[in-house]
Amino acid sequence: MKISVCGASDGANNDEIRKKAFEIGKALAESNVLVLTGATYGYPHAAAKGAFSNNGKVMGISPAKDEKEHINKYKFPTDSHTQIEFTGLGIPGRNYPLVKEGGAVIIISGQIGTLNEFTMAFHANKPIGILKDSGGITDIIEKIAEICNKSDEKENIVYSDDPKELVQLVIDKLKNSAK
């Protein structure tokens, strides 16, 4: 099972949300889920650290063509990842493989890049978990889903402000969608 964790990298400075992102990563690792991130900093990196701290597997999907570009151009971290796949697709190009590879997506706060990841997952009818009250686009996701008026896709979105509950809801949706 693979779940992509997307969210704010810039402006991800809320300690409470960072702790929740860490707990999301830990809970995913406890459930033997391969955690995918955009190999970036911020809340996705906190989730990667949580999974990694719990002996989980974490794959970063980098926009860079190689490790040198990943570090020097993007200034992205290399710690807390079991593996980093260098796509050379840039930003937002790497968002597509990040969302495509995950069976589901968890969103923590976020801005335009995260909105892009959400719309791809929504359109693909993937299970999506929203960390409520994490700020950014999560504050308006419900309204976006309503405006898009796709009842099947709206059914695949789950919301919680509790990291463990959110992970369980997403895993349950993912298991049910595989049936």
Image: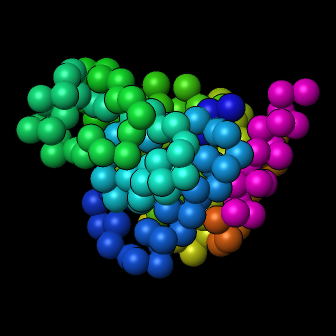
The image shows a total of numbered marks equal to 0
Q: Is residue 158 above or below residue 150?
A: below
Name the residue at 57% across, 63% down: 23
Image coords of residue 18 (percent x, y): 44, 69
Image coords of residue 103 (percent x, y): 66, 32
Residue located farthest toward the front when viewing the structure as drawn? 55
Name the residue at 30% across, 23% down: 86
144 vs 179, left or right, is: left
Name the residue at 58% across, 35% down: 34
Is residue 107 something one can see in this rendering? no
Query: What segment carries the magenta color?
Result: 164-179
Q: Is residue 171 magenta?
A: yes
Q: Quadrant of the C terminus?
A: top right
Q: Quadrant of residue 153?
A: top right
Name the residue at 64% across, 55% down: 27
- For the stretch drawn in magenta, the main secondary structure is helix
Q: Quadrant of residue 10?
A: bottom left
Residue nearer the viewer, 17 or 80: 80
3 vs 96, left or right, is: right
Q: Is residue 177 above or below residue 141?
A: above
Judging from the image, the colouring scheme is rainbow
Residue located farthest toward the right when viewing the structure as drawn? 179
Image coords of residue 106 (percent x, y): 59, 50
Residue nearer the viewer, 151 or 118: 118
Q: Quadrant of residue 78?
A: top left
Image coords of residue 49 (percent x, y): 42, 54
Is residue 31 something one can see in this rendering? yes
Q: Quadrant of the N terminus?
A: top right
Q: Is residue 45 magenta?
A: no
